[in-house]
Amino acid sequence: MSGADLAVTRRTLLAGAAATALTPLRAAATAAPVVVTTLGPIRGSAEGGLHVFRGIRYGQDTRQRRFQAPLAPRPSRDPLDAFAFAPSCPQKNDRYKATSEDCLFLNIWTPEARPGGRRPVMLYIHGGAYSTGSVVDPLNDGRHLAAAHDVVVVTVNHRLNALGYLYLARLDPRFADSGNAGQLDLVLALKWVRDNIAAFGGDPNRVMLFGQSGGGAKIATLMGMPAAKSLFHRATTMSGQQVTASGPVNATARASAYLAAAKAAPAELPALPIERLIDALGAVDPILGGGVYMGPVLDMKWLVRHPFWPDSNPQSNAIPMLLGNTHDETRAFIDPDGPKLAGIGWDNLAERMAPELKVDILPEWVVDQYRRQFPSYSPEQIFYAATTAGRSWRGQVIEADARAAARTATWVYQVDFRSPTQKNRGAPHTMDIALSFGTLDAEGSFTGTGPEARKASATVMAAFANFARTGNPNGAGVPTWPVYALPDRTTMLFDSASRAVPDPRRWERELFARVPYIQPGS
């Protein structure tokens, strides 16, 4: 693709990115590219005017290094094909059929795989808490974003669940890296990007991380990890915060519960079949109940302080940041047609709602306050409003306020665009994935493909791309978006007609601020 072609493409698509997301990209202008990297020559494919590389190895097979820090791959003299997605990390999730411990691979979409492009790099980290998920999901396809905004899109897989976050260090010092191995995989991927992305047309000095749910939490954690310092330059967390990490004592208790389920000592784990390691994830969490929690650990080696407690980590304050949530977070993972909502009424609302709030607050009082404030709300509406505010928004409010107190470059958004295809879901958790990637018609999208969805997506994509390019989301295609500051707390409401408003969740924010927030898994 020539420089003139890129200039025309960029001017055209900045004005209408969402239209591009649902129309065929123009025919490929170049042959299949071969790029020389630290791994050796890598052969990609030409697809619809882009150069695409799927399944680029950034780390060695982790099967040989269970519960240890990853190693950079050995280079190859022969060209390596990057035509297909590599396996995802083994997990308790039947959605991803191709899984393997050899899962340290990334994928790239670029307008032109040639040095000198110096395009912003947008690197996506998937959700699924710290236990499931993969960037092979069609929602995470980077072609629309790369084409619409002349950026290089990178998506990354890494170790999850026990393979990435089982904290064994206090039980066996040989596994000193175990509690944060998954984070160290991401650090290694960022180093690979630093050393190689220029050859793909990217700018190693303009790397933006964005991630949804667990992906956002991983990013919030990386922002304060000394090993990740200077490896990325902007951060966007989408419905995913990490105020505090897991404490080492609680993490050890969880490891003990996991070992009991696996019927193994720490020294035996490296030799166990992977199926047995995954089955043991069904252990009961000794702190939270339910399945055993896995997540980053305050191990005082790789993570030496909490990400946003007691304040915003000074290392992270230097990084411009976008934080976002959706209006109806819990409508995604608490099924409106499921047993938790079956037969809900005023007589059982408090009881049903209490375990879902994740904070210790008198549920009957919460119900009473909501009924006074929103007299037209049904029991179901109060259930979702309160659980979203008490459970899903608190972490973001704490992080945003902490960054505002430190006078950092921070912008906050809320997705108000409601699903036209599943109207009982409102604007649920995961809504912003399709909006930010332009994958409105992908499996799993709540957005639909109508003109209102296209408008919302155009604004989100433009804001994210502007942020990647300049460190500020303002610019072409985005309404004026002030920095988040106290006491105004101005927030962008992404919708078919997006707008910035001051403190849109003030009443609910103040209601739940009466009680302490404890990050689940801490």
Image (cartoon, rainbow, N blue to C red):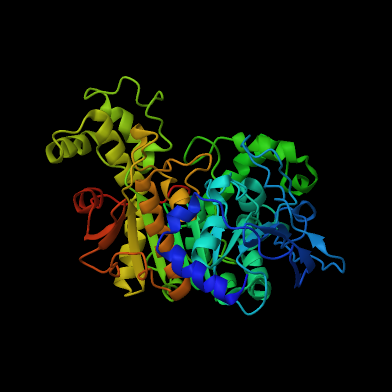
Residue 513 placement (x, y as % from top left): 25, 52
User: On the rendered structure, is 46 left or right of 127?
Assistant: right
Give whichever of 138, 328 is nearer the camera: 138
User: Which residue appears at 34% of the width and 47% of the height?
Assistant: 452
Q: How many marks?
A: 0
Task: Name the quarter where the N terminus is drawn.
Answer: bottom right
Eyeballing the image, is 336 above or below 278?
A: above
Residue 332 in view in this figure = yes
Residue 391: percent from left, percent from top: 35, 45
Front-most of residues 200 and 50: 50
Query: Which residue is drawn at the image coordinates 34% and 32% (left, top)?
Result: 424
Identify which residue, 365 or 340, lies in the foreground: 340
455 w.r.t. 289: above or below: below
Looking at the rendering, which quadrant does residue 365 occupy? top left
* Residue positioned 27% across, 49% down in the render: 515
355 in relation to 453, above or below: above
Residue farthest to the bottom? 116
Instruction: Find the residue positioned furthest to the top.
Output: 343
User: Which residue, as the protein is rendered here, is positioned at the far right?
Assistant: 77
Tell me: 144 left or right of 496: right
Looking at the rendering, which quadrant does residue 265 occupy?
top right
Percent of width and height locating residue 158: 64, 54
Q: Residue 289's spot in the image, x, y percent?
A: 48, 36
